[in-house]
């Protein structure tokens, strides 16, 4: 089971793509959108959003938590599949939670003791919604590959 925790106020430009991948992935994925804070300066917003995220993470005590971060390890699709497969197979974990931050970012020092690892899709920063679509696409891609299906129809 994969859960995506994302701090997002709107994915309207990518809504149909998110819905399509969510439909294809079925019950293997759950998306939880967290409303971002909009009051305060950038640092106050980062702190508030990180604290809100930490409250949500408490509900996922038996999961592997992976933060999408530009400082994370860059993986190709097969390395990403191995990480997902290994994390899902570990008996002490019941799934993987992916964390997508907000444009202001998150307090990664505060999050450090609550996450298991950080990954990056590339050295560039992706818009929040595009990172969510990319993550969903990669989860779908590795699922089809592992089932022996052709990804490209």
Image (cartoon, rainbow, N blue to C red):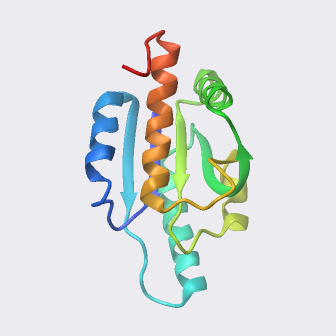
Q: Observer-nearest residue: 96 or 80?
A: 80
Q: Is residue 71 left or right of residue 15?
A: right
Q: Residue furthest top?
A: 148
Looking at the picture, how far across and down is residue 69, in whole percent?
65, 56
Please tell me which residue is depicted at 31% across the width and 45% down the height of the picture.
17
Marker count (numbered): 0
Where does the image place residue 76, in percent across and percent down from the top left?
A: 66, 34
Q: Residue furthest bottom?
A: 41
Residue at 49% x, 62% y: name it. Answer: 127
- Above or below, comparing residue 11 to residue 38 in the picture: above
Task: Please tell me whether residue 84 is drawn above or below residue 89 in the rendered image.
Answer: below
What residue occupies the far front of the structure in this picture?
Answer: 153
The quadrant holding residue 34 is bottom left
Task: Find residue 23 and report its horizontal and vertical position in percent.
Answer: 28, 33
Q: Is residue 150 above or below residue 22?
A: above
**Side of 122 where 24 appears, left or right:** left
In the picture, measured across the screen, residue 72 lies left or right of residue 17, that is: right
Could you say which is closer to the camera, residue 91 or residue 141? 141
- Drawn side of residue 30 relative to residue 128, left or right: left
Residue 1 makes an appearance in the image: no
Whether residue 6 is visible, yes or no, is yes
Residue 110, percent from left and from top = 69, 66
Considering depth in this image, is 142 or 153 the residue closer to the camera?
153
The residue drawn where x is 60% and y is 68% is 106
Q: In which quadrant will I find the C terminus? A: top left
């Amino acid at each position: 089971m994969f859960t995506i925790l994302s701090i997002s106020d709107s994915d309207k430009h990518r809504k149909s793509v998110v819905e399509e991948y969510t439909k294809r992935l079925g019950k293997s994925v759950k998306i939880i959108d967290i409303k971002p804070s909009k009051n305060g300066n950038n640092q106050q917003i980062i702190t508030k959003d990180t604290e809100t995220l930490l409250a949500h993470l408490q509900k996922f005590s038996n999961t592997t938590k992976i933060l999408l971060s530009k400082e994370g390890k860059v993986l190709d699709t097969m390395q990403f599949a191995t990480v997902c497969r290994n994390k899902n197979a570990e008996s002490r974990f019941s799934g993987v939670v992916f964390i997508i931050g907000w444009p202001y970012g998150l307090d990664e020092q505060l999050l450090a003791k609550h996450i298991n690892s950080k990954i990056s899709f590339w050295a560039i920063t992706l818009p929040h919604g595009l990172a969510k679509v990319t993550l969903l696409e990669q989860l779908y891609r590795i699922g089809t590959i592992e089932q022996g299906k052709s990804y490209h129809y």
